Image (cartoon, rainbow, N blue to C red):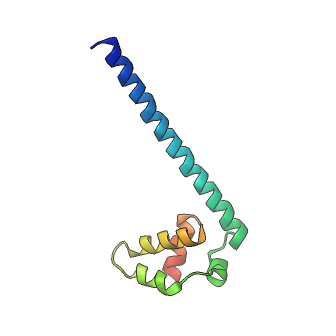
Amino acid sequence: MTWFQVGWLLFLAVIVVGASLWNLFRGLRRIAVESKQFEASFGGSVDRMLADAVIDRDEVRRLRSVGSSGAAGAARYVRKTLGVPFGPALEFARRV
């Protein structure tokens, strides 16, 4: 193996590790932002979210009834619409 090949492999490894770390950082940041928004909007309470959330509840029920992964799909819809973490979104989808 030549020095050029070793250098190229090292460069690719640095790019892959850097991209992985960047995605991890973005994911952790998104979770922190969603948690803060959940606390600010609903006081960290799923009961308050059930009372105050402006969301199409029929769509949540439809997505929840799709099959074995329906609750997760409904939670993704709630998470996308309201900007809350996955745990409270899942609990909301199950209780609607």
Looking at the image, residue 43 sits to the left or right of residue 88; the answer is right
Query: Residue 79's spot in the image, x, y percent?
Result: 54, 68
Instruction: Farthest residue to the front: give it.
Output: 4
What is the tally of numbered marks visible in this picture? 0
Query: Residue 9's spot in the image, x, y percent?
Result: 35, 24
Instruction: Farthest residue to the bottom: give it.
Output: 58
76 or 9, which lies in front? 9
Query: Residue 1's spot in the image, x, y percent?
Result: 27, 14
Q: Is residue 58 visible?
A: yes
The residue lying at 59 percent from left, 55 percent from top is 30
Instruction: Farthest residue to the left: give it.
Output: 1
Seen in the picture, residue 17 relative to 92 is either above or below; the reply is above
The residue lying at 66 percent from left, 67 percent from top is 38
38 or 15, which lies in front? 15
Looking at the image, residue 68 sits to the left or right of residue 59; the answer is left
The residue lying at 49 percent from left, 87 percent from top is 58
The residue lying at 56 percent from left, 48 percent from top is 26
